[in-house]
Amino acid sequence: VLSYAVIHLPNGQVMITFVDVTDTVNVERALKDRNEALEKSDQLKNEFVQHVSYELRSPLTNIIGFTELLSLPSTGPLTPKQREYVEHVGSSSSVLLTIVNDILDLATVDAGIMQLDISEMSIDRTIAAAAELVADRLEEHRIKLKVDAAAAPKSFHGDEVRVRQILYNLLSNAANYAPEASTITLACRQLAQGVEFSVHDDGPGMPPDVLESVFRRFEPRTNGGRRRGAGLGLSIVKSFVELHGGTVRIETGTDKGTTVVCTFPDTPSGGIREAAE
């Protein structure tokens, strides 16, 4: 491949220059082909993850439903051991369904097809709903939840389902690291141009090397946690907050506990579907 240029000289003559750019063109073609292959691979991965997630979610929902049915007195009496087994099946299935839903949500975000259902949402109602989802875990470890929303507005514009999911993941993560009989604080306050939510626990905190990878997917933390999760909770938080046009930061230190702070703008941006539509 040759590149040429025609240059008119002052004396009326014409100079033509040729440059062999074969290597450059070949490199550009190789990079373009590689980029297209990576994009195709990523698209296939997202399609596969979405398909598998849908296929897993249906039987899991059935298992949870039949487990709840077995627990009803109308189904018939269960021995203490049988009831224990049923409870284990139910709780494990619920955990697995949560993981599947998280994977599906992240795949939807990656594919660029997730849309936020923006409406005016009640902050008190959203906080209460998220707290209810982790109430059993907190009670199990005698952990108290302190809600500080005195400086919060009554409402703000956001996707209530996704904000609840954000708060649930933050509380669930905090419950995993908070010491027995300690207190987790969920705070909300009005900013000059938005709203801020934060969740603090008095756990062991994060060392610098863990902090660098905390938002990576499938990177579960093991230092001081009660259970090893799939490592998706904070990835979900970051993806959903950024989809609103907000930011996430972590304030932590070894033996200083951890505070995760999420800020939301007054006017969300990103993949938005207005509730009125």
Image (tube, grey):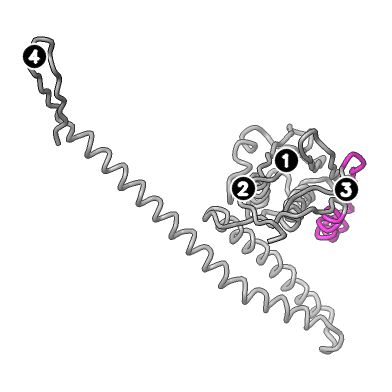
Alpha carbon distance from label 2 to label 4: 59 Å
Q: Tell me residue 131's x, y (percent).
A: 84, 55
Q: Are marks 2 and 4 in contact (CB under 8 Å)?
A: no
Q: Is residue 191 visible?
A: yes
Considering only vertical position in the picture, is 251 above or below 223? above
Q: Earlier in the sequence, mark 3 or mark 4?
A: 4
Q: Quadrant of residue 56?
A: bottom right
The residue closer to the viewer here, 85 or 137, is: 137
Check contact, mark 4 vs mark 1: CB within 8 A: no
Give the image quarter of residue 3: top left
Percent x, y of residue 252: 74, 34
- Name which residue type carries label 2: Gly
Crowding around mark 3 (Cα neighbors within 10 Å: few <14, some 14 to 19, many 20+) is some
Q: Earlier in the sequence, mark 1 or mark 2?
A: 1
Secondary element at image label 3: loop
Say which residue label 2 marks.
270
- Distance CA(mark 3)–CA(mark 4): 79 Å
Viewer-side residue, 210 vs 80 = 210
Q: Is residue 133 magenta?
A: yes
- For the residues labelled 4 and 1, the Cα–Cα distance comes to 64 Å
Q: CA distance from mark 3 to mark 2?
A: 24 Å
Q: Is residue 226 visible?
A: no
Q: Which residue is mark 3?
A: 154
For disc 1, the marked residue is 265
Name of the residue lying farthest toward the front: 12
Which residue has dot 4 on it?
12
State how far apart marks 1 and 2 are (Cα).
Answer: 12 Å
What residue span does the magenta drawing correspond to?
Answer: 125-152
